[in-house]
Amino acid sequence: MAQIKFIRKIALFFLILIILDLSLGQVFNYMSVHSKGGYVAHHNHIIDKTHEDILIFGSSRAIHHYNPEIISKDLNMTCYNAGQDGNGIILFYGWWKLISQRYFPKLIIYDVTPEFDLQKNDNHKYIGWLKELYDREPIPEIFEAVDNTERVKMLSRTYRYNSKFQQIAADYFHPIYKVKGNGFLPLNGVLDTMRIAKSKTENRIQFDSLKINYLAKFIEEVGESQIVFVHSPIWYGLDTAKLQPIKELCAKNNVPFFDYSNDSEFVHNNDLFKDGAHLNAKGADAFTAKFVGDLKRKSFLRGASKK
């Protein structure tokens, strides 16, 4: 009898855990879907509501470096900045697969960050913003590629939000980040060279075959869209050996690649940077205008200057 009571208590304990997990999952799902602004609302718009002619993908260097107003005005096409801090192709390939179920933009601009798009590091951090989308195909395939044990963890509804509790709550009650209606998040201020971190040097660059494979798949699957890859300016300048895989992919697939990593107009120009890796608002406007001018001179855009 005592043994049966113990088993019942254990069963009740796990039942309570399951109910609590499902309930918290529902609460955070509701808050995420109904967020009032910030990154969460930004992500919801990217995945389910974008309809713009041009989409911009990439890390923080994308969301801070490309002003859609300038792009729209110069190319006469609508534009949305779909960048996200600290992320690369693993996240953006997942987002793209969901977006492409709705429509194909005329042009995709992808700002490459070697650390996030090409080099080896912990790929788990790139699936963080995909967890709550796990029930939507083909997101589970990406989790399987990163770590096949994730499918077990994803049985927990709370786990799908565990790294984003604070962000989701903030964006539901009082958004911290004021992302513009076109997705752009300009940075104010100028670089303080006294506070800038020393640029890291790497003896051996290790490329990630998974990331490079997703870049190749992305290029292959863009369908009716055109795509260009860009490395926007960096205050330090860059060892361009870090860009070799994307250069090879672009050459192989006849995709334009614009490299501004060592552009003398921007490198070590303190007035145009917020920090060593990011342009400020003034620098973003200057870079966007220069990039669009170069893009137009390439004369490859179908539908440019057309609504």
Image: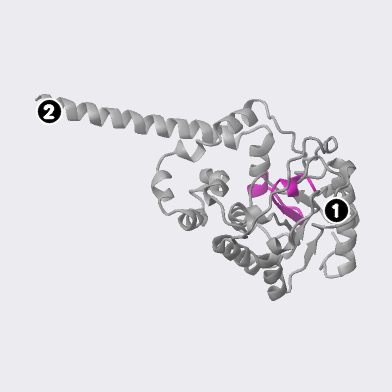
Q: Is residue 84 magenta?
A: no
Q: Quadrant of residue 5?
A: top left
Q: Secondary structure at mark 1?
A: helix
Looking at the image, is mark 2 or mark 1 earlier in the sequence?
A: 2
Which of the numbered marks, if any, corresponds to residue 119?
A: none
Asked which quadrant contains residue 242, the reply is bottom right
Q: Nearer the viewer, residue 23 or 61?
A: 61
Local SS, label 2: helix
Q: Residue 175: horizontal and vertical position, in percent?
A: 68, 29
According to the image, label 2 marks what residue?
A: 3
Magenta run includes residue 48? yes
Q: How many marks?
A: 2
Q: Residue at x 80, y 63 (%)?
A: 258
Q: Residue at x 65, y 43 (%)?
A: 43
Relative to 128, is 102 above or below?
below
The quarter of the rendered structure image containing the N terminus is: top left
Magenta stretch: give its range.
Answer: 45-65
Type of the residue with mark 1: Ile
The residue wearing badge 1 is 71
| Residue 296 spot, x, y in % from top left | 88, 64
